[in-house]
Amino acid sequence: MATVKVYFDLACPFCYLARGFWQKMQVEYPVAAEWVPWEAHPELPPEGKAKNLDAAHAGLEKLKLLGKGIREFELNARTPNTHNALLGLEFARSKGKLDKYIERFYRA
């Protein structure tokens, strides 16, 4: 079976939505995946930075039209630095708990 590499950043709302689509797809079309963390903004300071929510909301509205049952969520007004979260993800992977880590991170 082929393995698809899925690059994502934990703070990316589009990655969050894509993971939901991926999980629904797995019911009918199971495909092995290698989840590869990608720090989208390594240049951010530890406290993150403010972001333009208007642009983010517009993009999410377009995606909602494509996917039924997308859970509503509130966008953070800051783009967080995800470096430490991604380090935690690698620790979870080493313990065989990658999926649990990702799910709990996104629920939070």
Image: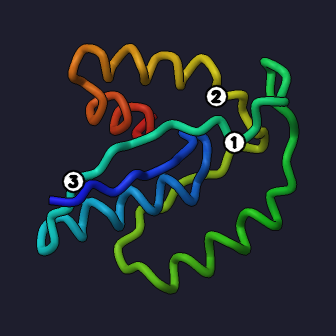
Colour mode of the rendering: rainbow
Residue matched to label 1: 40
Residue matched to label 3: 32
Look at the numbered discs 1 and 2 and tell me whether their residues touch, using CB distance below 8 Å.
Answer: yes
Q: Kindly identify the residue that appears in the image at 55 percent across and 76 percent down.
A: 63
Of residues 106 and 85, the one drawn nearer to the viewer in this rendering: 85
Q: Which sits earlier in the primary sequence, circle 1 or circle 2?
A: 1
Instruction: Determine the CA span between mark 2 and mark 3.
Output: 25 Å
Residue lying furthest bottom? 65
Residue matched to label 2: 82
Residue 45 lies, with reference to residue 1, above or below; the image says: above
Q: Kindly identify the residue that appears in the image at 33 percent across and 44 percent down.
A: 34
Which of the 4 image quadrants contains residue 108?
A: top left
Q: Which sits earlier in the primary sequence, circle 2 or circle 3?
A: 3
Q: Is residue 11 left or right of residue 17?
A: right
Q: Is residue 32 left or right of residue 84?
A: left
